[in-house]
Image (cartoon, rainbow, N blue to C red):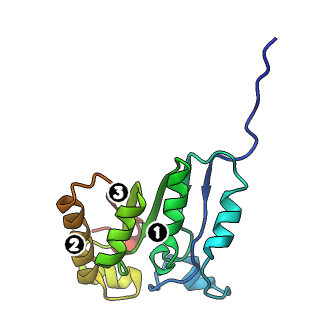
Amino acid sequence: MTTTSIVTLPRSIYIEPTSRCNELCQQCPRTLLSREDDRDLSFENFRSIVDQFPVLDRVVLHGLGEPLLNKDLPRMISYLKERGTYVLFNSNGIALTARRGQALIDAGLDEYRLSMDGATRETYATVRGVDAFDKIWRNIKAFILLQQEQDASKPAVSLWFTAMRENLH
């Protein structure tokens, strides 16, 4: 007779590294209803959450905040990669500096999803509540160039849009 064990814990989870954000998106509950304090998840608390799961195939590091605002994000990614976990997050790209980009590559991030929600500067500003369209494009182009210079296949970079009346043309 064979014994089969059943995994009872999830193998894919979302963890919010921060509740802070540098945008005021019109569709975001954080903008409309936020009553929480702006806080970052410490690496120690992050590790205590992750360590409760014996196997994690995939972790998404975002919630309502902008993940790049947490200084411990690269460390969190590295910790998950040491466990063999696929790691990704969505970001608005405003804080994607060269230093942060290099840290994401070094940490082994698998997927970087750039949330745009506007194909023009005007639409972006309307939907996102800030005029950062040009800065974001500069940041993401520099990040992709950095990857190419290092022949880094990861992270995969993709653009994400939330369809709404304001950005459908």
Q: Quadrant of the C terminus?
A: bottom left
Depicted 69 relative to depicted 82: above or below: below
Residue 166 is situated, as x and y percent measured from the top left of the image, at 36, 75
The reply to whether residue 51 is visible in this rendering is yes
Marks 1/2: CA distance? Answer: 18 Å
Number of the front mark, 1 or 2: 1
Residue 160 visible? The answer is: no
> Eyeballing the image, is 165 above or below 132?
above
Say what secondary structure mark 1 lies in. helix
Q: Tell me which label, 1 or 2, sits earlier in the chain.
A: 1
Against 41, residue 50 (above or below) is above
Query: How many C-alpha atoms fall within 10 Å of the one at disc 3: few (<14), some, or many (≥20)?
Result: many
Question: Callout 1, which amino acid?
Answer: Pro
The quadrant holding residue 121 is bottom left
Using the numbered discs, state the Cα–Cα distance from disc 3 to disc 2 in whole angstroms. 14 Å
Mark 1 crowd level (few <14, some 14–19, many ≥20, 10 Å Cα): many
Q: Which residue is mark 3?
A: 155
Q: Tell me what residue is drawn at x 22 percent, y 77 percent.
A: 138
Q: Which picture quadrant has residue 144?
A: bottom left
Amino acid marked by disc 2: Ala
Q: Nearer the viewer, residue 116 or 148?
A: 148
Residue 15 percent across, percent down from the top left: 61, 64
Q: Secondary structure at mark 3?
A: loop
Q: Which residue is mark 2?
A: 142
Look at mark 1 in the image and give the residue it sits on.
Answer: 74
Q: Is residue 39 left or right of residue 92?
A: right
Of residue 168 and residue 73, the one placed in the foreground of this image is 73
| Residue that extends furthest to the top in the rendered view of this protein | 1
Name the residue type under label 3: Pro
